[in-house]
Image (spheres, grey):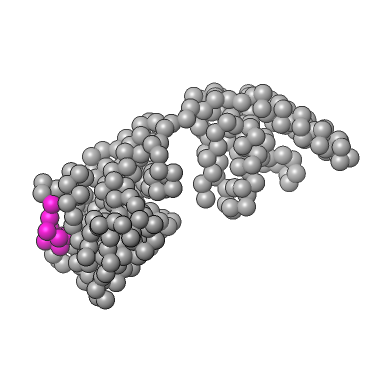
């Protein structure tokens, strides 16, 4: 018994696909990005590989409503081995859109992006038979009609999929003939396009799965008073612990750096800050980012760190300086 596919326990797959697409569109509009119809169609297909009997059976086992749900999936045949939903979803995206950028964003949306060699290795050297095996195990369902991607719901995902020669030519052409590898500017543009769709997809997908509410943009506002209060608090803590000289040095360094940045940061660009350990780079960096965001009319601040421990630590500081902090590992 197949039943209606879900994306997560208790959530229909088509609802998750539509929600993710809508959230990504709202985020794109908020940050002055664009999503064309082809990109939106890829978002609507990002988890379609979850329409797999083995995955649905596993999902039903984790669903508290499984005992009363009339659509529960109770069985899958032994040959329907589930190896993940990213790769079959990506294959369908590439077949429908002809875009390796969109297909790669979908393929890697539960992991990290690969470099060009890794991308070529998968798409060009991958076995066509593996793609067919993955797609054969998937099933279509009536709720697909709400995605509005097909004139009519297909009987399966194989009939409209390219034959082996066409598929291999599509992958080869996308990565060996059409890719402008000798044009650094064009390659940079393609990489940014990949990062854009990948970031929007990952964030929207997680939001719908983990938060489950409608995404709303939260406007960013400078918090000068909170910075002043935080500095005073740290100065008092240093005095009580016998480190008043360190506090005075940090305060002087903070004021000097901010004053210099006020004169230097006259337009958007790439700026660096180099300070020794213990100088208070977190506070200074957030203060400079806040100043730049206000000066250049930004909608928020993105703070990227190399380790989860640093993310936790710096998010704790940021939470004392800004009203809205979203931490993402």
166 or 17: nearer the eye?
Answer: 17
242 or 171: nearer the eye?
Answer: 242
Residue at 10% x, 46% y is 151
Horizontally, residue 308 falls left or right of residue 38, namely: right
With respect to residue 159, does 319 lie above or below?
above
Residue at 30% x, 62% y is 56
Write the start and end of the magenta stretch as one range. Answer: 153-161
With respect to residue 285, does 45 lie above or below?
below
| Residue 300 in sight from this viewpoint | yes
At which x and y percent is residue 182?
Answer: 33, 51
Residue 93 among magenta residues: no
Q: Residue furthest front?
A: 68
Residue 158 among magenta residues: yes
Q: Residue furthest bottom?
A: 78
With respect to residue 79, does 294 lie above or below?
above
Horizontally, residue 262 falls left or right of residue 231, namely: left
């Amino acid at each position: 018994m197949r039943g209606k596919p879900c994306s997560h326990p208790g959530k229909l797959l088509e609802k998750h696909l539509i929600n993710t697409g809508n959230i990504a569109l709202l985020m794109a509009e908020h940050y002055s990005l664009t999503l064309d119809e082809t990109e939106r169609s890829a978002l609507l297909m990002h988890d379609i590989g979850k329409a797999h009997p083995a995955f649905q059976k596993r999902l039903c086992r984790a669903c508290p409503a499984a005992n009363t749900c009339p659509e529960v999936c109770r069985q899958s045949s032994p040959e329907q081995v589930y190896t993940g939903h990213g790769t079959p979803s990506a294959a369908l995206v590439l077949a429908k859109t002809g875009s390796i950028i969109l297909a790669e964003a979908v393929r890697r949306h539960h992991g990290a992006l690969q470099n060009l060699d890794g991308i070529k290795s998968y798409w060009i050297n991958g076995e066509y038979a593996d793609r067919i095996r993955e797609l054969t195990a998937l099933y279509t369902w009536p709720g697909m009609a709400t995605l509005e991607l097909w004139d009519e719901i297909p009987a399966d995902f194989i009939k409209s999929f390219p034959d082996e020669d066409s598929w291999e030519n599509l992958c080869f052409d996308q990565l060996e003939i059409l890719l402008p590898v000798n044009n650094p500017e064009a390659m940079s543009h393609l990489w940014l396009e990949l990062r854009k769709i990948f970031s929007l997809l990952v964030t929207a997908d997680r939001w719908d799965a983990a938060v489950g509410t409608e995404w709303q943009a939260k406007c960013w506002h400078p918090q000068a008073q909170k910075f002043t209060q935080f500095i005073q608090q740290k100065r008092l803590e240093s005095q009580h612990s016998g480190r008043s000289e360190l506090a005075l040095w940090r305060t002087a360094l903070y004021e000097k750096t901010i004053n210099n940045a006020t004169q230097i940061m006259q337009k958007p660009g790439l700026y660096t800050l180099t300070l020794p350990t213990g100088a208070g780079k977190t506070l200074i960096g957030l203060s400079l980012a806040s100043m730049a965001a206000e000066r250049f009319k930004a909608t928020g601040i993105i703070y990227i760190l190399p380790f989860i421990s640093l993310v936790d630590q710096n998010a704790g500081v940021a939470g004392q300086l800004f009203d809205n902090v979203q931490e993402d590992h």
